[in-house]
């Protein structure tokens, strides 16, 4: 398998960082989509999926985890196709009762239209997607309920936010004082034990340099775990960047209120950073500017 080669029944719909990548399967008996992007991108998701399906219906929708950038298009796809929907088993009750707090949408200030589900996924399950067999594996760390999908025949891993080419997603449980670093390490060790030849991450391009990516991820995890303030600061920066991706510009005078109104930011700041509202806003903006992820113009923070 070459660096960009996929089985003929698979398509990767690579998205920007506001929406997760979508993986489309065109099996002989069933079509399926893994993850559905963010709510505001739902019309684009529908168009991309329809183009990829080439007139076929979407039979099944699966989510690796239920962060808003991975399931925000669920409701639109369900309405358009009536597709059978499968979610991680650990969040079934949260979705059934549509608990926005437990699902993290209140805490992060992110949007997600309510959706339903037909069945659940858990570690140890096997799936048939694109006429290939996929093993469902637990991938806690970034999210306690996250799953990844592994195809032993081709050595393909759909890694969600457990492993990117240059790291992984924010370790959110640690922000609330819960364990996350140990779980993230166990997930990376699990991935290292597999014969992975190609990774399809939740964000970014598919890649084959799995050993190098794991080395980077282990090093970053060690750096964050050595001082949890680093994880908290990174999380707050990422949350502001996500809001900036969604809005494209935010007035500088609104940043303090925007950050301090988010329960997850408030909890992380109280536990780890202990900055005043003004100081937190100035610090977070400075982090985005230093990273080249934003610029300031005419009193506004602009996405870059």
Image (cartoon, grey):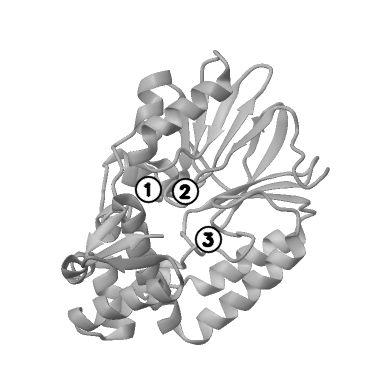
Identified at 47% across, 86% down, the residue is 227
Quadrant where the image shows the C terminus? bottom left
Judging by the rendered image, the residue that carries numbered circle 1 is 68
The numbered mark at residue 65 is 2
Report whether residue 59 is seen.
Answer: no
Q: CA distance from mark 1 to mark 3?
A: 17 Å
Looking at the image, residue 193 lies above or below residue 282: above
Looking at the image, residue 32 lies above or below residue 247: above
Viewer-side label of 2, 1? 1
Judging by the rendered image, the residue that carries numbered circle 3 is 140
Report whether residue 53 is seen.
Answer: yes
x, y percent for residue 111:
28, 46
Viewer-side label of 1, 3? 1
Left or right, residue 298 beside residue 80: left
Identified at 56% across, 67% down, the residue is 184
Of the pair 241 and 78, the residue shown nearer to us = 241
Disc nearer the start of the sequence (1/3): 1
Q: CA distance from mark 2 to mark 1?
A: 9 Å
């Amino acid at each position: 398998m070459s660096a960009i080669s996929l089985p003929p029944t698979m398509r990767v719909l690579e998205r920007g960082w506001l929406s997760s990548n979508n993986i489309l399967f065109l099996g002989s008996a069933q079509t399926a989509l893994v993850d559905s992007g963010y709510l505001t991108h739902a019309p684009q998701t529908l168009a991309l999926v329809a183009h990829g399906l080439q007139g076929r219906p979407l039979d099944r929708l699966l989510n690796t985890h239920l962060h808003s950038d991975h399931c925000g298009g669920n409701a639109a796809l369900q309405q358009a196709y009536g597709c059978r929907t499968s979610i991680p088993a650990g969040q079934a009750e949260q979705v059934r009762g549509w608990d926005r707090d437990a699902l993290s949408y209140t805490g992060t200030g992110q949007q997600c239209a309510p959706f339903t589900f037909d069945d659940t996924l858990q570690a140890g399950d096997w799936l048939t997607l694109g006429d290939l067999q996929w093993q469902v594996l637990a991938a806690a760390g970034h999210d306690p309920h996250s799953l990844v999908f592994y195809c032993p025949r081709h050595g393909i891993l759909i890694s969600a936010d457990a492993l990117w080419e240059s790291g992984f997603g924010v370790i959110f449980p640690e922000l609330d004082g819960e364990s996350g670093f140990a779980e993230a390490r166990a997930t990376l060790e699990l991935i290292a034990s597999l014969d992975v030849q190609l990774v399809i991450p939740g964000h970014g391009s598919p890649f084959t340099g799995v050993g190098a990516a794991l080395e980077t991820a282990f090093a970053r995890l060690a750096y964050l775990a050595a001082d949890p303030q680093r994880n908290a600061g990174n999380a707050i920066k990422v949350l502001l960047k996500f809001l900036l991706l969604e809005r494209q510009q935010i007035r500088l005078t609104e940043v303090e209120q925007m950050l301090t109104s988010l329960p997850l930011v408030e909890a992380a700041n109280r536990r780890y950073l202990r900055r005043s509202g003004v100081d937190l806003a100035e610090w977070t903006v400075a982090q985005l500017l230093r990273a080249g992820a934003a610029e300031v113009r005419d009193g506004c923070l602009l996405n870059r």
